[in-house]
Amino acid sequence: MGTVQLAVSKLVTNAYKYAPGPCLLDLEVSESAVQISVWDTDPALPAACPADPGRAGQHNLEIIMAVCQSFEVRREPVGKRVRAAIVPADDPGGDPAGRLL
């Protein structure tokens, strides 16, 4: 649950921070994964910044890509949609089940 909350927070924060208009959040929960979808009005596709240990901030996309089983971004007729899937953890240590390495 914590990983899902983190991913939702990062995706919605990015939409709020960089898109000029509203955003929509959609969550779908199945037995195998939680699908997160965030739509916003900015057509610019996000890109991860080059690695820089001295950089403060702008790590949201890197975090999302590290904790999600799948991640995709696509342009919509208005704006863009970001989708990510998180597989629930199997153990108390929080290792994601079925994560693609």
Image (cartoon, rainbow, N blue to C red):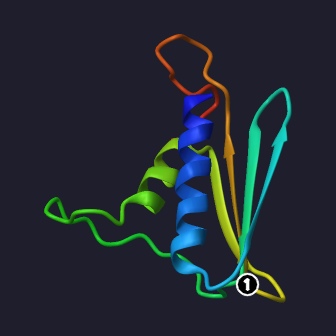
Rendering coords of residue 53 (x, y %): 16, 59
Amino acid tagged 1: Gly
The quadrant of the rendering that contains the N terminus is top right
Q: Nearer the viewer, residue 94 or 20?
A: 20
Total tally of numbered discs in the picture: 1
| Residue drawn at point x = 44 percent, y = 59 percent | 60
Farthest residue to the top: give it: 92
User: Relative to 101, is 58 above or below?
Assistant: below
Left or right, 88 with respect to 65, comes to right
| Residue drawn at point x = 86 percent, y = 33 percent | 30
**Quadrant position of residue 87:** top right
Farthest residue to the left: give it: 54
| Residue drawn at point x = 56 percent, y = 12 percent | 91
Residue under numbered circle 1: 79
Left or right, 49 with respect to 4, comes to left
User: Relative to 58, is 77 above or below?
Assistant: below
Rendering coords of residue 92 (x, y %): 52, 10
How crowded is the residue under tag 1: few (<14 C-alpha within 10 Å), some, or many (20+)? some
Regarding residue 2, the answer to whether it shows in the image is yes
Could you tell me which secondary element the residue under label 1 belongs to?
loop
User: Relative to 93, is 101 above or below?
Assistant: below
**Quadrant position of residue 59:** bottom left
Q: Nearer the viewer, residue 66 or 5?
A: 5
Rendering coords of residue 82 (x, y %): 68, 66
Q: Nearer the viewer, residue 9 or 64?
A: 9
Left or right, 33 with respect to 45, comes to right
